[in-house]
Amino acid sequence: MAKIIPNLSVDCVIFGFDFNQLNVLLVERKLDDEKTGKSLIDDWTLTGYHIFEDENFDTAAARILKGLSGLDNIYLEQFYAFSRLDRVNSPNDKLWLDHQSEGFSERIFTVGYFSLIDNTTVSISHNDRNVKWFPITDLPELGFDHKEILEKALEKLRAKLRSEPIGFELLPEKFTVSQLQRLYEVILGTKFDRRNFRKKVLQMKYVIPLDEKQKGVKHKPAQLFIFSKEVYEKTKTERFDFSI
């Protein structure tokens, strides 16, 4: 079995959307005193791990995501490298690393990735730790420098959302214009005029209307659409911009 590289890791910021708010997947970091049972550490972290000697950063990040979701081909993008001298130097971080037996270094460099998942349909689990979706507007205490990593990932996501159609990765295959608008509003922290937004979406050749409407909803069923990556690749020289 390949050995880990003690001072190199990846941390994955896994974003999900539930039609109402943008969420991030966190892993509980809990440590109790073996003798007294007293809680020593009780906070949350992003999901990540060290890379193995036979991996590069991309394959390590894909391995971590597959282990959590069982899925391949999830949207995954490297966005930044974190190398601050004191990034694992807090008392809790040192205590946590001291209780691990994997032989981690005291100085760890990590490469950040963000991933986009429709968290209404994808089941997430961790072998031996609790995982949970949290709204990005209501986060618990985060360990290590993961607050900084999350903020950097959000900055990158917001920038790309205006210029590339990556937001569709957070939606189910079939969606409504209202759901798409809500997605952009919660991520960008703004409000769009409903008619202008719809007009802009309907001008996009790669957002294809279906002869199908929502089912099982209490309000008037809305028309459903799909995003065609194939059509987008053929027409992506056209301007993509949600600056209204």
Image (tube, rainbow, N blue to C red):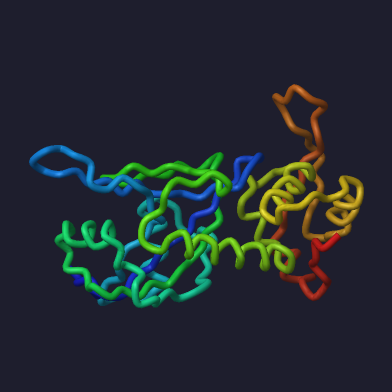
Q: Compared to 105, does 127 lie above or below?
A: above
* Residue at the spot 50% in from the left edge and 44% down from the top edge: 134
* Res 175 → quadrant: top right
Q: In the figure, residue 61 lies in which quadrant?
A: bottom left
Q: Which of the 4 quarters of the picture holds residue 146?
A: bottom left
Residue in the picture at 86% in, 60% down: 244
In the image, taking residue 143 as reference, residue 21 lies left or right, namely right
Viewer-closest of 66 and 147: 147
> Is residue 28 or residue 92 the one in the foreground?
92
Q: Is residue 104 above or below residue 29?
A: below
Residue lying furthest left in this view?
A: 35
Q: Quadrant of the N terminus?
A: bottom left
In the image, is residue 161 above or below residue 24?
Answer: below
Residue at 78 percent of width and 34 percent of height: 213
**Residue 92, can we see it?**
yes
Where is residue 160 shown, x and y percent of the image? 67, 67
Hey, which residue is sitting farthest top in the picture? 218
Q: In the visual, does 136 lie left or right of 107? A: right
State the image coordinates of residue 125 (x, y, percent, origin top left): 37, 44
Residue at far front of view: 91
How far across and down, in percent of the image, does residue 13 sit?
A: 48, 59
Is residue 69 in view from this perspective? no
The front one of 136 and 76 is 136
Image coordinates for residue 123, horizontal then vertical, percent: 45, 41
Q: Residue at x 28, y 75 (%)?
A: 107
How many numbered callouts? 0
